[in-house]
Image: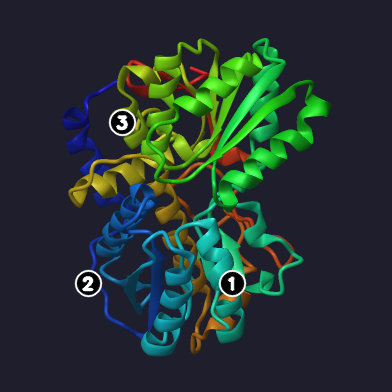
């Protein structure tokens, strides 16, 4: 594989070919798009790459989408559901945005959903938490997912766990909507797939010493552990405790830890951990993901992982919607238009497809099972 520096020039050439040079004139009414991401707090590890990607792609288009000027207005939800709801309210009422990418976490989206419903502005959520697009939510019509949901790919991952010999597993999860659902879903499918969950442990974002939790896993006699975590420091702390306690069992993780920051924080302790990944940027990128990497490199950002992928999904979804709208743009018009999008141009793995009944735009074809080898996520198929 080429090093980052060796491939940078080729990537910049690819970026130049993706969008033509900007400079076209504005012919349609300008719009504002809100962006509510976790740019501080524990979830900033993916909120910042999402933000950087949106800025890079916006720069590439010159802020013009099919003759319409599009401005991005940012608000930091600080990894706090209350702040997420406040940001959505502020951007709609004060900035008059017609759609919002975010909030950054599943808990934030659930908190902001009633606001989006009341103010009639769609949210494009970059979170896997299944509950955000639950049709039982009164705000379901206003929430779209720009990531695979937490159930996508988990069946295949758990079958691989059993195939590799595990029967008694432990689950560690972060104490939020993302973590709890992943833990509950694993227990739900365990009987059909052939494993038993013998210990589940929830931990807060800020936990650093996880030795007591790992000791519980060892005492329970687990033969594998599954990590439903997305905070890289939390994942690294768990691996440190595993090493200190001497728990020698296979370790698996859902897509939340498929980030370069996890590899960097874990160091040698990450070797051999198997991770379900949303795409595989920057390690085994598809041709489409190479275009995204090119745009990031051109604008001074080193690709990190799925944070950039979700940012790109959000931008391309909005681009596709705006290209279909000729008249005035409102939140209602944006919502109705997004529901008609399927097979539109993307620069990531998978096929973006929405409908009136399906607000989960990306599915299992956007996922790949990887193993950390020599400090990189390497696709198991290679």
Residue nearest the viewer, comparing 1 with 180: 180
83 to 212, vertically: above or below: below
Tally the numbered discs: 3
| Dot label at residue 265 | 3
Q: Residue at x 55, y 35 (%)?
A: 254
Q: Residue at x 47, y 52 (%)?
A: 346
Q: Quadrant of residue 218?
A: top right
* Horizontal and vertical percent position of residue 35: 39, 69
- Residue mark closest to the camera, 2 vs 1: 1
Q: Earlier in the sequence, mark 2 or mark 1?
A: 2
Q: Residue at x 28, y 61 (%)?
A: 55
| Dot label at residue 23 | 2
Looking at the image, do the residues carrying marks 2 and 3 touch, with CB atoms under 8 Å apart? no
Quadrant into which the N terminus falls: top left
Q: CA distance from mark 2 to mark 1?
A: 37 Å
315 to 160, vertically: above or below: below
**Circle 3 SS class:** helix
- Residue mark closest to the camera, 2 vs 3: 3
Q: CA distance from mark 1 to mark 3?
A: 33 Å
Position of 295 with respect to 129 (left or right) is left
**Circle 1 SS class:** helix
* Horizontal and vertical percent position of residue 73: 33, 75
**Residue highlighted by disc 1:** 113
Residue nearest the viewer, comparing 198 with 87: 198
* Horizontal and vertical percent position of residue 147: 54, 51
Position of 42 with respect to 343 (left or right) is left
């Amino acid at each position: 594989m080429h090093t980052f520096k060796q491939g940078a020039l080729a990537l910049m050439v690819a970026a130049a070919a993706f969008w033509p040079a900007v400079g076209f004139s504005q012919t349609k009414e300008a719009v504002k798009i809100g962006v509510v991401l976790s740019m501080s707090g524990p979830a900033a590890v993916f909120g910042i790459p999402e933000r950087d990607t949106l800025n890079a792609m916006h720069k590439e288009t010159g802020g013009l989408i099919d003759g319409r000027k599009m401005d991005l207005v940012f608000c930091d939800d600080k990894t706090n559901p209350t702040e997420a709801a406040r940001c959505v309210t502020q951007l709609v009422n004060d900035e008059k945005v017609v759609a919002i990418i975010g909030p950054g976490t599943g808990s934030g989206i659930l908190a902001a959903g009633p606001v989006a419903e009341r103010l009639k502005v769609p949210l494009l959520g970059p979170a896997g938490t299944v509950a955000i697009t639950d049709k039982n939510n009164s705000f379901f019509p206003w929430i779209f997912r720009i990531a695979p949901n937490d159930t996508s790919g988990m069946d295949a991952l758990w079958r691989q766990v059993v195939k590799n010999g595990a029967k008694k597993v432990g689950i560690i999860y972060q104490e939020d909507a993302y973590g709890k659902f992943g833990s509950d879903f694993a227990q739900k499918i365990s009987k059909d797939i052939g494993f038993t969950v013998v210990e589940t442990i929830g931990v807060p974002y800020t936990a650093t010493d996880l030795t007591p939790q790992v000791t519980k896993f060892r005492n329970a006699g687990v033969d594998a552990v599954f990590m439903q975590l997305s905070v890289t420091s939390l994942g690294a702390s768990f691996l440190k405790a595993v090493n200190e306690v001497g728990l020698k069992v296979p370790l698996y993780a859902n897509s939340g830890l498929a980030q370069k920051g996890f590899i960097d924080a874990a160091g040698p302790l990450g070797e051999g951990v198997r991770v379900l990944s949303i795409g595989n940027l920057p390690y085994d990128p598809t041709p489409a993901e190479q275009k995204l990497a090119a745009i990031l490199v051109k604008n001074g950002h080193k690709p990190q992982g799925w944070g950039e992928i979700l940012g790109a999904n959000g931008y391309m979804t909005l681009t596709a919607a705006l290209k279909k709208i000729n008249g005035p743009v409102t939140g209602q018009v944006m919502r109705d238009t997004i529901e008609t999008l399927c097979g539109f141009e993307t620069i990531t793995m998978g096929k973006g497809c929405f409908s009136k009944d399906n607000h989960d735009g990306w599915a299992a074809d956007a996922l790949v099972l990887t193993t950390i080898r020599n400090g990189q996520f390497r696709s198991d198929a290679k």
